[in-house]
Amino acid sequence: MTEPVAKAKTGVTRRLSNALVAFLVVQSLAAVFFVGDVIGDLIADPGSTHFITEALVTLVLVMGVVFGAVALRRTVEQMQAQQTALAVASGALAEVIGAQFAAWGLPPAERDVGFLALKGLDVAGIAALREAAQGTVRAQLTRIYAKAGVSGRAQFAAFFVEDLLGQGLPVDPA
Amino acid sequence: MAAPFRTQADEAGAIQPVRLWDPVIRLTHWGIALMVLANAVLTEGGSRIHVWAGWAGLALLLLRLVWGLVGTAEARFSAFPPNPAAALRHLVRLARGRVEEYPGHNPAGAAMAYALWATLAVLMASGIWMTGGKSPMQLDAQRAAVAAGDWSVMVAEDRRDDDKALGDAVEEVHEVAGNLILFLVLLHLVGVVAESRALRRNLVLPMLFGPRE
């Protein structure tokens, strides 16, 4: 549910970090060849403007490599933090759902069925997983929808999606 | 539900850290590997492309060393300080098939990384010495000058190379280091295979593709 958004976000950061790495490698190559050239010039003619200019350019380039590396580290760490946040967020969502199930007074069996339904399993799938008859699962789902005050599966799922869209849970769920 | 810190468990139930390796580590690793392979097997020693490849490898090595100071947690030297005693202990455990999980380099892998870097440094320093400290661009310019009939650069070259014994010694060092790095690479491959078997997971994939989604 939030996952596509968060995934897209990490995707952007990943592309950014890949671009930064490519840039950093090209920069390092340029810096090393320039440093080699500057050392050659230093041996040949240390006082010339040519040498001083080139040495300055090279110094800036080397500093650019270091700063680029620091920026890249931040990006990579940010990417890892986003992944962790995503995992925590999906854990937190499960908690929110669990609390709402409790508020509706669902017994443990109905909570399990509710979770599985939210995960997108159909009646046959839930029945197979819980080793129960399809009729039982159908009856449990009907009771869940009644307690939640929703018309069916779509509205049931929408109840939690709404929360993720940033408008919060309705004050009176029933 | 989902644990806050993601780990992946394979069929054997082994926990696999998901964060290895960062893009700079991967790129410098394979870049330098490619350079070593090219200069050991494909290019002719002292040829134009051999020198260019060596300098490109030098750039990647320096980038990796900078990354070891300012990079990600697993890339920094402080995360895997050289510790020969721990490396030996790890190898003994590996021989018994009972290895521990490390969040980054294991002690033996760390020792291998430092050995490879030191050998690369010797290789590159001796190589640069052999080309008179000239960058590939300067060597190209010199070649062009000679081709155009200006032989004066060759004279300067001869004068600098009068210490022939030292030059020969450096050349010897370059060759020995070149053979040593191939031996280390072989050892590294054996280590990766042994470690992968002991941990029951593929250690090459994270180095190729990085952390799994």
Image: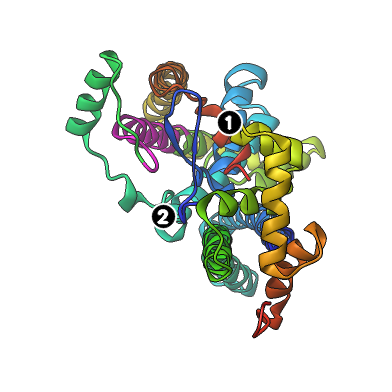
The answer to whether A21 is drawn above or below residue B134 in the figure is below
Which residue is drawn at the image coordinates 60% and 72% (left, top)? A48
**Of residues B5 and A163, the one drawn nearer to the viewer in this rendering:** A163
Chain to which mark 1 belongs:
B
Magenta stretch, overall SS: helix
State which region is magenta. B103-123
Q: Are marks 2 and 1 on the same chain?
A: yes
- Residue B205 bears which disc, if any? 1
Which residue is drawn at the image coordinates 68% and 74% (left, top)? A163
B116 inside magenta stretch: yes
How packed mark 2 is, by other alpha carbons closer than 10 Å (few <14, some 14-19, many 20 or more), is: some
Which residue is drawn at the image coordinates 25% and 30% (left, top)? B87
Going by the numbered disc 2, the residue's amino acid type is Ala
**Of residues A146 and B139, the one drawn nearer to the viewer in this rendering:** A146
Which of the 4 image quadrants contains residue B149?
A: top right
Residue pointed to by mark 2: B73
Which of the 4 image quadrants contains residue A51?
A: bottom right
Q: How many labels does the image show?
A: 2
Whether residue A156 sits left or right of residue B196 in the image: it is right
**Of residues A161 and B66, the one drawn nearer to the viewer in this rendering:** A161
The secondary element bearing badge 1 is classed as helix
Q: Distance between the residues labelled 2 and 1?
A: 20 Å
The answer to whether B16 is drawn above or below residue A10 in the figure is above
Note whether residue A139 is visible. Answer: yes
Furthest residue in direction left, as rendered: B85
Residue A78 placed where, x, y %? 55, 65
Q: In which quarter of the image is the N terminus of chain A?
A: bottom right
The secondary element bearing badge 2 is classed as loop
Residue B61 placed where, x, y %? 50, 44
Q: Looking at the image, tell me whether mark 2 or mark 1 is earlier in sequence order.
A: 2
